[in-house]
Amino acid sequence: MRPVVRLATAGVLALAVLGSVPAWSDAAVMRILVEFIALLVLAQMWNLLAGYAGLVSIGQQAFVGLGGYGLIVLADDLGVNPFLAVPLAGLVATLFALPTAALVFRFRAGYFAVGTWAVAEVYRLLVANTPALGRGTGRTLAAVFPLARESRELITYLLALAIGAAALVAVYAYLRSRLGLALMALRDSEAASETLGVDVFRTKLTVYLVAAFGTGVTGALLYLNLLRISPDAAFSINWTAYVIFIVVIGGLGSLEGPILGTVVFFLLREWLSDYGAWYLILLGSVAVLVMLVCPQGLWGLMAERWGLSVFPLQRRVQLTEGLTQARSGCLLRRDRPGPRRP
Amino acid sequence: MTLLAVRDLDAFYGDFQALFAVSLDVVEGELLAVIGANGAGKTTFLRAIAGVLPVAQQAVRFRGRAVGGRPAYELAAAGIALVPEGRRIFPSLSVEENLLIGAYRERPGSWTVARVYELFPSLAARRRQPGTNLSGGEQQMLAIGRGLMANPILLLVDEISLGLAPLVVRQLYEVLRVVTAEGTTTLVVEQDLSQVLQVAQRVYCFRKGTVSLTGRPRELGRAEIAAAYFGV
Amino acid sequence: MAWVDTVVQGILLGGLYALFATGLSLIFGVMRLVNLAHGDFSILAAFLAVVAVQVAGLNPLAALVVVVPLMAGLGWLLQCAALNRLLGRGLLPAVLVTFGLSIIIQNALLETFSADSHGLNPGGIETASVRLAVVTVGWFPLLTLATAVLVLLALQLFIGRTALGRAFRATSDDRETAELMGIDHRRLYALAMALSLGIVAVAGVFLGIRTTFTFASGPDRLLFAFEAVIIGGLGSLWGTLVGGVILGVAQTVGAKFSPGWGVLTGHLVFLAVLLLRPQGLFAPSRRVG
């Protein structure tokens, strides 16, 4: 069976299992799973930006907040169905991402990170000073109250599943496409890929907007789950902190890394929940150590050691009968090997 | 006396091998030329000796000590100065500061800023200007002066003729001849043969990462050199 | 005259921001590194001063004698043990490591000193004031501005006139060729980081005297330092001072309109400079970032 088909089958099975959770588990488990999925999607988006496009942003919390507040405004003030408002809030975030990009793209490399954070702070302060958005105290999502609690929690959970699955599929499909190839070339060498016709600016902008959309949708999902939003929470740098730890510990630049990282993150959180700030100190220390000693992260280590790959993205050149052809992934030529030349 | 002894030197850029078992001697007090076509490995060779590229420890012996793989700043302190390809003048430093930075390790010797200005008067006139404001020829002079300020035992010079008029190049080679005569052993890497073979006492020719010929310029025929250079 | 007073307060505040910004600008100039824990280190220094005051009964300004060398030593250690290992791996690892350090420092401070506000009391000088023509200014803000100017002068002399300063400039231009001159860039970077943290320690202690602070005060310091550098222009030491002053004035004037708008006004001025003149107001010729 081709690896992609294997992957798709596994994915459908996983989805089925997760989809059945409401039947045999309780609301607390569903809430944690929603949070898990949310962090996973945030991590995938950040990984796309930093691990693939080389854009190290510490300001993605801007889009978490914009998505969250977008949800409130759309659902409560504009009367949109709150569940429908979640993807629409993503669009709101993307809309704000355009002027944001116009500003932060003026920074190169080193200062880009701080620049994104500065802009996130501006959004936070603007929201905190806007009476209609509840100022510093924030707002509560009222539009869901007519719904029974079980129904709301169920639909939120299923929505989270849909978002998580869609995000993984979309990112994977994108990376396997020609656009994704351009992105990976860009990551390896900006100068070289530019000479080959890759529009560096457009590619980076597209990724930035896509990441903003994904982050915004997730922000909306998070506050659909939490119901109560405030600027300090929604625009908190902690979102970025968690995501960075997840991606670094799990492994940058792969799809599997963030998944593994999110699992580790949640496990650590459960084990260390009684230790307050020590939990973050440990997380920070592990991330720093990983970057210093083993930058490819847990998944990178595992993949290297055991040759694993859940989301195959490498392209191999195989020479058959004197012809050179580039094929995607480690599939196809498995069952019909051609003569290999050294 | 052999100042620098290179034996079976291999050098790599990542997975790509640029030098294959190069063996070479530099005799104290001589002006040695290393010639070869573009890509033959000459600059790689200089970088390997100067400590910019990592190589096997025993492959390079300087004054009897194995120094292969030592970092460049250590070798600079030990008396090996490299005048790099493309001059690489520091833009944030003035002409005089570029010279002064050459003496960063404060090695004892007779080269001072005043002496360099005697050698290259046009530099004195521009001492306070940014180093990169100079013409190509003057920048090359500055780069050589900067190398001399380190009071080196071995001066390595990489491709000084690139982009310069023949007259200027001749003047520079005359300077190198004088410098060598006064006691600084000099190794010159050069693509353009017209001038270097007139001042060098011995020559090595590189081709595709190995030594293809060695001898005294006067004793080698044009055809022989061409064959070693181009490989025909 | 209230507006004049506000602007003067802003200028003096700018002196403090310039102190914060100098260290950041220095290491970015020398090694192209942005230390995301820069602000947190200054708060760490402020807390160290708190300890020195509690344990030894020192005046906070006297505590500088202990705190500054300690922080400088920490900077040296940080560079040697961690950041030097990241050289040649691009900017991502350095950003992530310093970000991780920022989180570690903040939470370590939280665990050690709780979430309470702390302050440093130098025994009256912080409330003393002097009359200058039409305005009354505090002694301490004046001292802060004077310190910032002195530090910048000293740094400029160091970079411009000494052999080590030449080595900094050469290494910043072309690290490989600088190595050919015998310059070990690792030790140079360690020295730069030591200088940077030493300066930011002074800034932190001065901040602690001027106002109260908590474990979480670090990130805002980084932000203001960053904004001051960008407004003033990269690669210009005195631009950093001007940037700090502009930021300070923007904040105080904004706060006069409405208390919640002080910091925000500063951010907006920063963004305006970024939009209209991205290289900053005094940049020599370098690109942004």
Image (tube, grey):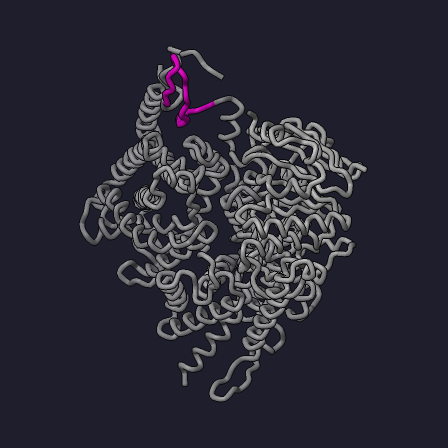
In the rendering, at what x and y percent does residue A232 appear? Answer: 39, 55
A80 on left or right of B3: left
Magenta-colored stretch includes residue A320: yes
Q: Is residue B192 left or right of residue A303?
A: right
Please tell me which residue lies in front, A301 or B188.
Answer: B188
Can residue C78 be seen in the rendering of this structure? Answer: no
Residue at coordinates 47% horizontally, 23% vertically from top-left?
A308
Residue drawn at x 22%, y 51% is: A76
Give x and y (percent) for residue C24: 54, 59
| A226, above or below C255, in the image | above
Image x and y of residue A62, in percent? 36, 51
Please report the residue visible at 45 percent of the width from the left and 14 percent of the height from the top: A340
On-image quarter of the N terminus of chain C: bottom left
Closer-to-camera residue (C153/C109): C153
The residue drawn where x is 70% and y is 32% is B219
Measured along the vertical axis of the image, is residue A284 above or below residue B125? above
- Magenta residues, as a range? A308-326
Q: Is residue A49 left or right of residue A96?
A: right
Instruction: Compare residues C25 and C284 and report the one nearer the observer.
Output: C284
Looking at the image, the residue that sits furthest to the right is B1
Residue C161 coordinates in the image, percent (x, y): 65, 66
Q: Residue furthest bottom?
A: C133
Is residue A190 visible from the viewing direction of this image? yes
Q: Nearer the viewer, residue A182 or A148?
A: A182
**On the image, which quarter does residue B22 sit in?**
top right
* B74 inside magenta stretch: no
**How many labels were placed on the picture?**
0
